[in-house]
Structure formats: structure tokens, C-alpha cells
Image (cartoon, grey):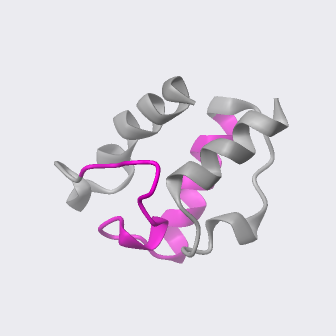
Amino acid sequence: MFQALATIREVIPELFPAATGFEVQPETMLSDIPEWDSMTSVNFKVFLEETFGVIIPDDLLEGGSTIGEVITFIGRAD
């Protein structure tokens, strides 16, 4: 979990430039990430799938999920 969280923390400012300096924690709601919208969620999904080799269901990234829930899904998909 910690490695996945660290990887996500590194990429958030790249995918969401307004999130530079935004603190990402497991309990962070995706919808709370600055600039989060349907287009950026697609970019985040592509990043997750390419980086972690999993297929992320669209409903997991609808904004009502947390970073921790995404990481838990990734861990179960391994």
C-alpha cells in the first residue's frame, strides 16, 4: 500500500497541476483533488492501469471514492 500511495503522490501534480502542494492521504476523496473532473479522471485511470497493470472499473473513479479505496483495489487485483 505504501509504495502505491507514494507512486500516486508523485504523479498527482503532473496530472493535476493545480494540486501541486496538495496533500494526498488514503482518506482523500478523489473529488477533492484540485481539477478533478471526468477528463482528468480518464488520465488518472490510464496512469493507474499502465503503472500497476490492472483494469480499473470506471465507477471506482467517479469521485466518491478515496485514494485508499483505489489502492486497496490495486492490491487485490495483483
* Residue that extends furthest to the front in the rendered view of this protein: 27
Q: Residue 41's x, y, as percent?
A: 54, 64
* Residue that extends furthest to the top in the rendered view of this protein: 3
Q: In this view, does 27 lie above or below 73?
A: below
Query: The N terminus is located in which quarter?
Result: top right
Q: In this view, does 69 lie above or below 41?
A: above
Q: Residue 78's x, y, as percent?
A: 82, 29
Q: In which quarter of the image is residue 32?
A: bottom left
Residue drawn at the location 54% of the way across and 74% of the way down: 63
Residue drawn at the location 41% of the way across and 70% of the way down: 36
Residue drawn at the location 33% of the way across and 70% of the way down: 35
Instruction: Determine if the magenta segment contains residue 42.
Output: yes
Compared across the picture, whether 23 is left or right of 78 comes to: left
Q: Residue 53's x, y, as percent?
A: 75, 32
Q: Is residue 6 above or below residue 31?
A: above
Compared across the picture, whether 13 is left or right of 44 comes to: left
Q: Residue 50's x, y, as percent?
A: 67, 35
Compared across the picture, whether 50 is left or right of 57 comes to: left
Compared across the picture, whether 25 is left or right of 4 comes to: left
Q: What residue range appears in magenta?
A: 23-50
Q: How many labels does the image show?
A: 0
Instruction: Determine if the magenta segment contains residue 38.
Output: yes
* Residue that extends furthest to the left in the rendered view of this protein: 21
Residue drawn at the location 50% of the way across and 27% of the way down: 2
